[in-house]
Image (cartoon, helix red, strand yellow):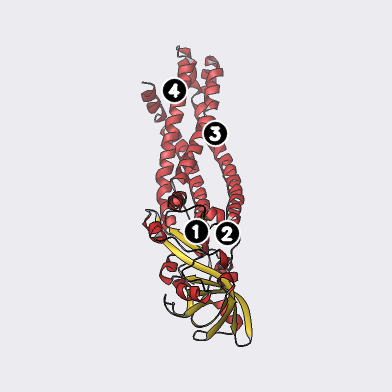
Amino acid sequence: MMFKLAWRNIWRNKRRTIITIVSIAFAVILSSIMRSMQLGSYERMIDNSVRFYTGYIQVHKLGYWDEQVLDNAFYPPAGLQEKIESLEAAEVAVPRLESFALASYETRTRGAMVIGIDPEKESHLTEIEKKITEGSMVGLNEPSVLMGSGLADYLNMKVGDTLVLISQGYHGVNAAGKYEVAGLVEFGLPQLTNQVVFMPLPAAQYFYGADGLLTAIAVVTDQPNKVAAIREAILRNLDTTAYEVMDWRTMMPELIQGIEIDNISGIIMLLLLYLVIGFGMFGTFLMMTKERLYEFGVMLSVGMHRSRLQLLIFSEIVMLATLAVLTGFALSLPVINYFSQNPISLPDEYKTAFEKFGIEPIYAFSNEPIVFTSQAWVVFFMALVLSAYPLYKIWKIDPVTAMREGR
């Protein structure tokens, strides 16, 4: 009976009810869109970083991450890559053999990072074929390489020239070879573009005298929220006294720190937004209480208990807040879903600056459920806290004075 009466009461004054619902719904929409943009930028930043080089998870020989040298390469256990790829959330396991070499052409030389790759699997991680600016992709069994365009410019090389590489191989063996440049690649990060050489994995293993060896297996997934589960599944099938399995959080702590620092500023902005929203909501509750003073005075005069009147008003506020939050959900969901599928591109004058740092020049949005639920709960809680004012007013009200002031 109480809730039925409360429902009728909130629609007795449709104008006041609509104003209240709109104010709270606007708060939900504004805070959800703001948080969606912030979390979306983090998700895109993380995805760009891990797909730029490391992957979401890597398998190494125990101790490799602390001392990343070729002597810490390992023979992958039989069937390990297939087992990883058979996991439900894992997309592909990408083998890598990484080390350094002296790259030379005619009279110029420069230190280079040589990465042995499986071209087909590498395309799932770094999408390397999309970064080729000249030439073509290398094949797995071809004795040719892809070079960073910055390194090629420094060495005055072009597609079709022969690159000379000299290094120290596995356990100190001499490593030297000549390779045709099949194509040039360009990454958003200049440091990588200026020193990277991609070589087919069999050729890299032969060059370093490391037949069958890998320095890492990178795992790609399209479900970042299941990284922990994938890591645990890999660990169950691996000898942890000989191998280590690391996720992107462990491999890139500086990225986590950057996100945490930026998240603090975002939370401060949200708190300021909530403060503004709170004053707006308080204003609507203040208006509602002031307009109904005569009604409250009459109800108390005819014998209604203050506690029951408070329960009635609290029920009305709960219903209003629920309607407003659901309205905010309904209006913000399609907007956020649209922009999560169609990110906002930055103007051309900003694109170059962003791309130099390996950042996509877009505003990305997240449609994770927490974007909606967290903001809805916060605004709903604010409405309940602010309901303390009309409840307190009813507790202290004098019926005669209220009827006189409410006329």
Q: Which amino acid does label 2 sit on?
A: Trp
201 and 361: which is toward the camera = 201
Check disc 2 and report its element: helix, strand or loop.
loop
Q: In this view, does 71 lie above or below 377?
A: below
Looking at the image, is mark 4 or mark 3 earlier in the sequence? Answer: 3
Q: Between disc 1 and disc 3, whose residue precedes?
A: 1
Tell me whether circle 2 and circle 1 mark residues in contact (CB < 8 Å).
yes
Q: Earlier in the sequence, mark 4 or mark 2?
A: 2
Residue 269 horizontal/vertical position (percent): 59, 47
Q: Distance between the residues labelled 3 and 2?
A: 55 Å
- C-alpha gap between disc 4 and disc 2: 63 Å
- The mark that comes first in sequence, 2 or 1, is 1
* 29 is higher (above) or lower (below) than 208: above
Front-most of residues 405 and 137: 137
Q: Marks 4 and 3, Cα distance to the nearest angstrom?
A: 18 Å
Helix or strand or loop: what does disc 3 sit on?
A: helix
The residue at which mark 1 appears reads as: 58
Q: Name the residue under label 3.
A: 282
Q: Identify residue for label 4.
A: 312
Work out whether residue 362 can be spotted.
no
Q: Mark 2 points at which residue?
A: 65
- Mark 1 or 3, closer to the camera: 1
Q: Nearer the viewer, residue 92 or 169?
A: 169
Q: Is residue 345 above or below residue 109?
A: above
Residue 103 in the image: state x and y as whole percent.
59, 79
Which type of secondary structure does the marked residue at label 1 adopt?
strand
Q: Distance between the residues labelled 1 and 3?
A: 52 Å
356 on left or right of 240:
right
Few, some or many residues within 10 Å of mark 3 (<14, 14–19, 20+) = many
Instruction: Specify which label sits upstream in the sequence, 3 or 2.
Output: 2
Q: What element carries label 4?
A: helix
